[in-house]
Image: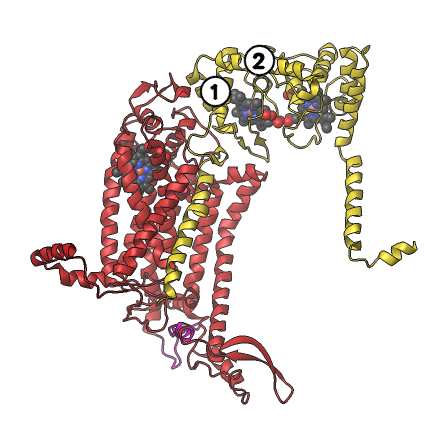
Chain colours: A red, B yellow
Amino acid sequence: MSRSTQAPKALRGAGNWIDDRFHLAKTGEKNLRKVFPNHWSFMLGEIALYSFIILLLTGVFLTLWFKPSMAEIVYDGSYERLNGVTMSEAYASTLYIDFDVRGGFLVRQIHHWAALIFVSSLVVHMLRVFFTGAFRKPREINWLIGVAIFTLAMLEGLFGYSLPDDLPSGMGVRILQGVMLSLPVIGTYVSMFLFGGEFPGHDIIPRLYMIHILLIPGILLALIAAHFMILWHQKHTQYPGTGRSNKKVVGTPMFPGFAVKAGGFFFFVFAVTVGLSAFVQINPVHLFGPFTPTSITSGLQPDWYMGFMEGSLRLFPNWFDINIAGYAIPTGVLVPGLVIPGLLFGGLAAWPFLEAWITKDKRHHNMADRPRNAPVRTGLGAAGITIYGLLWVAGANDIISETFSISLYALSWFFRFAVIIGPFIAFMVTKRICLGLQRRDRETLEHGYESGTIQQLPSGEFIEVHKESSTDTVHVLQSKEPVERIVVDADGVDDNGVESPEKRSLSGGLRSRLAHWFTKDNISFEGVRPHSGHHLHHGGHSEETAAEQPAATH
Amino acid sequence: MKWITARRRHPLAGYVVVILALTLFGVGYAYLAPGADRAEAQTLAAEATADDEQTDYALGRDIFTQSCASCHGDAGTGSQNAPDITDAGAAAIDFQVSTGRMPSMNPDAQMPRKPPAFTQDEIDALITYYEAEIGSGPAIPEEVPGTAPERADFEDEEAYEAAHAEYEASYEAYLDGAEDVEAGMKLYLTNCAHCHSWSGEGGALTDGKWAPELHEASPRQLYEAMVTGPGQMPVFNDMTITPEEKQDLIAYVKDLQAEPNAGGIFDLNRIGQVAEGFIGWTVGLSLIVACAIWITAKQRAHD
Ligand code: HEM
């Protein structure tokens, strides 16, 4: 890149004018040269940012015509099929956006597709952060902000989905009200408060509208700004590699390399969203018809990001519904509707602190973990994905039952068991795979990689020639941090027969047992020198024992 | 047998054996499958039509004894395999046979819609016999347009075209005669959509049963389904939903189905959010992530 070329005179003039007044050149220079690591998984968060921008722009467009009012009118407009039908102004104005506003239909579809892509990019972005341990010190706050963004994005989507007052909207709001009502004692009051009286009333859409276009976007915007400022300050984590360390970031400078890429990427995200919106029909509110409290239909789901809650509501049995002193406690709604999502988000928020507590790891981490090098965390992540995924799929059980001609009951029972057993299997399998990969890493580190060339030695023995891995590979392999294996024996005494003070408290005992569980299967790389194995130096066979030894390290 | 031995190891021998085996299975299945007696009934019926002397009554009797009596009994009073149809009525016979549900292949399972085993003339003959000998019940709503005429039922093109045009006209007239879109929509969304879904796409019911999609049903079949309540479906007789309301309802269903997909050429079968989410992930997000991989990979070669 030719950095030495002078900018055109006009630009230079303007630049100097600004600089004379604000002295930005220095800070500007520093920030523009900020380095961004090059890895596709670091772009996932950007997808979220770009789709959020698309949502803001298209959302503002929609507000120009959308009327958040539940006043009843008789439709008389361009969509002839529904002429003469009584509906709310909200629904009628959505039809107006679709059929009378130039480009309105497209923009509505862009807004909705962008919403789907926005939340899905948040999910993959979060998974990347989780599996690489990028939430560890010093980035816990940004992780918490991320969890908040995710939660708010789901709510934002739910409320947006409820605005057009079409059939699915109304059914979604009805379920929301059902979940609220399940709250013991305060349920009815909360519902009356939100709806301004009985369901559906006349207040809910204006209220949801205010929340949807003002409150949540405002909070989201603030959170996103904070997220980026913290990121800017702390810099990205990076994957291990040559020249990269906890102190030094390697990548493309912000300007021009990264800015050009990011700009191009924005347009790609925009193109995909618009492409989908132009060709694939989404949420055809004009076909659904307006919501009336007596209308109900099968085959309707919420948008995908609420799918796991739909699934948990569908799967959870009503066996535990109880009645206390005349108050019904519908656990069949309360647990799947509030407790399960609460556990999910609570667990996500608490994890960085839990992990730090268990491992007693107080160091700064700027290097991303390779997921295999944290087998328990990776396994837990896989278990979480399994629970979430199964609940999500279960939310579509009627569609699956119909599409594949499987009995609905059989399917529900399958999911009930799978949701309980699945995560354990996922945990064990994933952890085993991680450990296997670690073993292979150690072997590659020690012996180089298998070149595929077979050689016959003078003694007649056949061997496969191993070649030395590149320095980059060696760096990556060596990035595994040493893990101290924490041992607890039955009575919690150390080698000298002294009971550790931690053991005496309940939480301390729990911690050390968790720590043991966390580290017990660690595969130590201690004492492994790169390319010291016998396949490279066809000497004696003493390495055989050297290879055995590290496995027994404490 | 020598030539077989000689060719046993021919490279194509394996394929020949597989093809022979498949043919054998295919032919064997065709003989043994339950379709066989339906086919038989059909030829029998065809022979019967050929015979001008035979009245509707006799044709109907033959069809009934050949294809129905085995399950529903000679007098239609039912057996452990099948219900009593003495009070099912002409509408039920017409609905069940014209949608291909009856004659049933498997009395233990819900029957899907199939091409009917009999022509409309044969069904009419069957109904003549049914009304004379077996029983009575809801009548066929003759004023509601039934199934569109088939080219195969006509000798020449012209007669077919004429019949088709007449059918189209009555179809349009029936739908246009519906007065109240709102009533039709409310009736459908209140009474039918929780099983057949808002789009008529159908849906799963409990116990391995399902509500079928409504796209192929003619207005008359829709009407008959309501008055007879096949299988798991409740009966909506003319007291609960009046004939005018039925007309509104049917017009709503048919108009909705004829509605183009304004939102794009891919309508995702009007399944809705599950399909949208699936596309959002598999097409939308995947393309974007692929692009991210591409952008960052290109760079790597330079640094
Ligand atoms: C965080 C991001 C957002 C998400 C996830 C989101 C999601 C949604 C969804 C799913 C709908 C239903 C669309 C449909 O009818 O198919 C919707 C509607 C709507 N959104 Fe948003 N939205 C977001 C941000 C915004 C913003 C920032 C604004 C305005 C400033 C806005 C304004 C609207 C309006 C006016 C509607 C109703 C119009 C209609 O349904 O046709 N949205 N939103």
- Residue identified by numbered label 2: B144
Q: Main secondary structure of the magenta part?
A: loop
In percent of width and height, residue A535 lies at 53, 82
Relative depth, front residue between A306 and A6: A6
Say which residue appears at 11% left-offset and 55% top-offset.
Answer: A18
Q: Is residue A504 above or below residue B111?
A: below
Say which quarter of the image contains residue A358: bottom left
| Magenta stretch encompasses residue A484 | yes
Q: Is residue A184 visible?
A: no
Left or right: A132, with B20 as reference point? left
| Helix, strand or loop status at disc 2 | loop
Say which quarter of the image contains residue A185: top left
Answer with the quadrant where ligand 1 appears in the image.
Answer: top left
Instruction: Chain letter for mark 1, please.
Output: B
Q: Is residue B60 visible?
A: yes
Relative depth, front residue between B162 and A434: B162
| Helix, strand or loop status at disc 1 | helix
User: Which residues fall within the magenta stretch?
Assistant: A473-499
Relative depth, front residue between A199 and A528: A528
In percent of width and height, residue B5 lies at 88, 57
Q: Which mark is residue B92?
A: none
Q: Which mark is residue B252?
A: 1
In percent of width and height, residue A67 lies at 27, 28
Three-letter amino acid code of the residue under disc 1: Tyr
